[in-house]
Image (cartoon, rainbow, N blue to C red):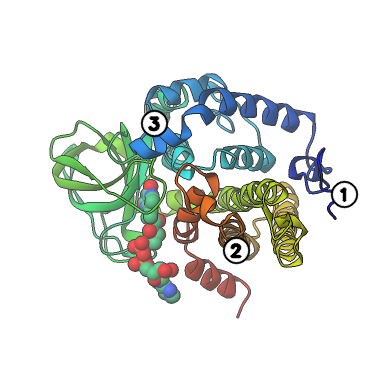
């Protein structure tokens, strides 16, 4: 093993390993463009931004200029339409290389905020909102989770009551990404009776009277702005209703499958980053007269990490094939997300263990990723909820 792994491109080089038939020249070109952008505009500042708990707002415009914000969105609003999940996988993989998920979460927050508007919003609303968001001029958040709970989406309590030509909104939202500095918020509100059939989506705008926000501190994702939102008799024009009244749940559901495939790709890519950083360390570090990588116990840790990463990647690609064929494999996508976050968790643990004290120090990708495991396992559908959904889909 030691000979094969000394210098040059290792057989485990993930970028070269995963260049199978699903990847074409356009995907490769997109990866190259994105990697250059990230190396130049993000990598030199990651530690500083993570410690500061924010990144400059100007990064949205820069990301839009390189095509990152607009990829996958309609050309009429300034996007680059690509009907192919491989682009979101390549994007998730490259963003994971930053090793600070908070930058990705806030920078790409429009990926959860904007789709419901595009899916069920009026043409006038799309034309007003989407071009500014895709140009990186405005930030668009999604606010569903409430202090009373996030998993049980159908049970939200924030209420909107129609009065003439506007709605009056009262309630609060919790753990909202880009919550302090967003300009637009796709907000789930209750306009009807209990359950999913009583939920609508409203577009709230940051300067509306009675709408306030407070920042929240958290274990990881430091560079992401996470906030609690408060609505105190906020008057929202009726034309800000996204889709039909009491049909908002459909708009929320539209997000789920795409978000899960992206999150699974991201989590597995974070696992890869952990593997790579630990391997670089283990090839250099010597203990008891030989490199860490030459101790069998350590070698087996890498083999085990690789086993989980390869399996997750193979399943991810199988899901992509099915999605491209027009299927919506809900059970597989739900369980894939669980598989990916467990792989990330395992690899973050093993990588930090291999790196010893150095891996525990701030400023190191593995240390940050370790802190970000749980948010991946909880957000975008928690492991428990994903398993339950899959079990039901599988008829169990
Ligand atoms: C950093 C961060 C950013 C976020 N950004 C956003 C955002 O932008 N917009 C947004 O709307 N939300 C956001 N969230 C919220 C996230 O979606 C929720 O945290 C998530 O949906 C879980 O909801 P909860 O935290 O209220 O936990 P709960 O729903 O209270 O669940 C608590 C625990 O119980 C488990 N559980 C719940 N019900 C069951 C059940 N029936 N069976 C078994 N186990 C169950 C859950 O899996 C979880 O482990 C964010 C969260 C974090 C931490």
Q: Quadrant of residue 168?
A: top left
Q: Report whether 384 appears left or right of 212.
A: right
Image location (x, y in percent) of residue 329: 65, 60
Judging depth in this view, the residue of 244 and 207 nearest the camera is 207
**Callout 3 touching callout 2 (CB < 8 Å):** no
* Mark 1 or 2, closer to the camera: 1
Secondary structure at numbered mark 1 = loop
- What residue is shown with label 2? 346
Where residue 211 appears, as percent x and y from the top left, is 18, 40
Is 43 drawn above or below residue 387 in the view shown?
above
Dot placed on the residue nearer the N-terminal end, 1 or 3: 1
* Residue position marked by numbered label 3 in the rendering: 55
How far apart in space, not on screen, are marks 1 and 3 (Cα)?
Answer: 42 Å
Position above or below: 262 against 295? above
Label 2: few (<14), some (14–19) or many (≥20) C-alpha neighbours in 10 Å: some
Q: Residue at x 58, y 70 (%)?
A: 390
How would you rate the neighbour count of disc 1 (Cα within 10 Å): few for under 14, some for 14-19, many for 20 or more? few
Tag 3 secondary structure: loop
Q: Is residue 304 left or right of residue 394?
A: right
Q: CA distance from mark 3 to mark 2?
A: 29 Å
* Figure quarter occupied by ligand 1: bottom left
Q: CA distance from mark 1 to mark 2?
A: 27 Å
């Amino acid at each position: 093993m030691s000979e094969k792994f000394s210098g040059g491109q290792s057989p485990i080089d993930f970028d070269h390993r995963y260049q199978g038939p699903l990847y074409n020249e356009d995907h490769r070109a997109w990866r190259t463009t994105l990697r250059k952008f990230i190396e130049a505009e993000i990598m030199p500042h990651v530690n500083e931004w993570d410690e500061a708990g924010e990144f400059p707002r100007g990064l949205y415009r820069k990301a839009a200029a390189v095509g990152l914000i607009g990829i996958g969105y309609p050309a009429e609003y300034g996007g680059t339409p690509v009907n192919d999940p491989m682009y979101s996988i390549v994007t998730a993989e490259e963003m994971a290389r930053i090793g600070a998920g908070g930058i990705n979460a806030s920078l790409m927050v429009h990926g959860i905020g904007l789709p419901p508007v595009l899916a069920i919003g009026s043409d006038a609303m799309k034309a007003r909102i989407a071009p500014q968001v895709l140009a990186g001029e405005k930030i668009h958040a999604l606010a569903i989770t409430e202090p009373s709970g996030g998993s049980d989406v159908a049970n939200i309590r924030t209420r909107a009551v129609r009065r003439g030509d506007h709605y009056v909104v009262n309630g609060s939202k919790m753990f909202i990404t880009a919550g302090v500095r967003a300009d637009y918020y796709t907000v789930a509100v209750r306009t009807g009776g209990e359950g999913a059939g009583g939920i609508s989506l409203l577009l709230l705008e940051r300067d509306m009277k009675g709408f306030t926000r407070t920042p929240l501190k958290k274990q990881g994702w430091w560079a992401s702005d996470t906030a609690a939102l408060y609505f105190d008799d906020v008057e929202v024009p009726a034309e800000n209703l996204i889709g039909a009244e009491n049909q908002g749940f459909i708009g929320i559901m539209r997000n789920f499958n795409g978000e899960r495939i992206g999150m699974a790709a991201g989590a597995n890519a974070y696992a890869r980053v952990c593997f790579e950083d630990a391997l670089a360390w283990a090839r250099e570090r010597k203990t008891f007269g030989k490199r860490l990588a030459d101790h069998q116990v350590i070698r087996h840790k890498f083999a085990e990490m690789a086993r989980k990463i390869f399996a997750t990647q193979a399943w991810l690609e199988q899901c992509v094939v099915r999605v491209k064929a027009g299927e919506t494999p809900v059970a597989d996508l739900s369980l894939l997300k669980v598989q990916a976050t467990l792989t990330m968790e395992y690899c973050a643990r093993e990588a930090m263990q291999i790196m010893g004290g150095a891996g525990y120090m701030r400023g190191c990708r593995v240390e940050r990723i370790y802190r970000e495991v749980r948010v991946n396992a909880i957000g975008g559908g928690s492991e428990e909820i994903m398993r339950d959904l899959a079990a039901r889909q599988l008829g169990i």
